[in-house]
Image (cartoon, helix red, strand yellow):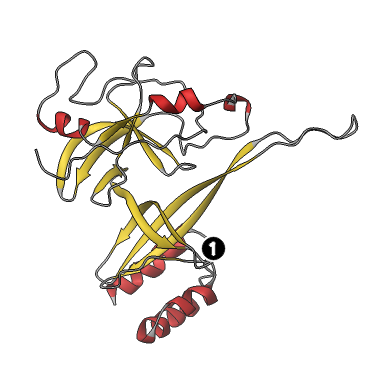
Amino acid sequence: MKKYLFLLPISLCTLLVQAQYSGQALSNASSGGSMDGSAAIINTLLGDMASRDAKRTKNYDEFQGSPYVSNNFQKTNIWYNDENMGDMLYRYNALNEEIEIKNTNLEEEAARSLARDKNIFVTIDGKKMGFKTFVTSKNKTVNGYLLNLLTGAKYDLYKRTHVKFTEGKPAPNSFVKAVPARFSHFTEYYFQKNGVNRIDEIPLSNGKLLKLLEGEDRAKVKTFLKENSIRIKDESDLIQVFGFLNRT
């Protein structure tokens, strides 16, 4: 067993929405069966999450939205660097920056959590998602999960789904409705230049993106945006721009 396979104690989180599970077992480590090979290795990367439900004091099923990108567990491959550890089911809790893992979709099987190790990542529709350190547009350094949208010769492009929880407010009188507690989803984008140990957020703005670039790359992108009449406003625009940079 390799020395990097450590259990990560799970944090005592207070927010968890219960979801209905559906589907079939997708892992080598099926319920009631023995585990060997890559499935046994995956098991050593997980931690017990039983304490979370014990700490929950509110019924978050009644809240608007969800802390999860998707409430359903979906198939994924787990990797350690370039080594494929096998497939399991995952669900991403974007509120707690946590990847929950199960062997099967059986309700009686408790979910566990992947270690927050920067060498570990999962695949989502063929793209890697891993734990990283990055800098927001407000110059705040944050640890969390980023989805790798584009890997290139000069730049990598990432996507972050971030969830914020807002407490509800009771109705002050009979003429005003109460405001329910809710989970709000936000999407952010980040880039990293090869050879630079820093990942920065990209505001969806031509001018703000240009300020983040340097030298010839800034001049090239400025011309590219103008010649192609691009006003950066969504993910496809960023992929187009960084794809261009990686080709030049």
Percent across and percent down for residue 57 are: 57, 25
Residue at 10% of width from left, 26% of height from top? 36
Rendered image quadrant of residue 135: bottom left
Question: Where on the picture, by quarter, is residue 11?
Answer: top left
Question: For the point 50% across and 27% down, which residue is it?
Answer: 55
In the foreground, 15 or 247: 15
Q: Please name the residue shown 36% across and 86% down the image.
A: 216
- 102 or 231: nearer the viewer: 102
Residue 143, image x, y percentages: 40, 54
Name the image quarter holding the C terminus.
bottom left
Residue at the image point whose x is 62% and y is 30% from the top: 63
* Total numbered labels placed on residues in the image: 1
> Identity of the amino acid at label 1?
Lys
Percent of width and height locating residue 50: 39, 24
Say few, some or many: other residues with alpha carbon within 10 Å of mark 1 (under 14 / 14 to 19 / 20 or more). few
Instruction: Write down the residue under mark 1.
Output: 233
**Whole-percent x and y of residue 121?**
27, 46
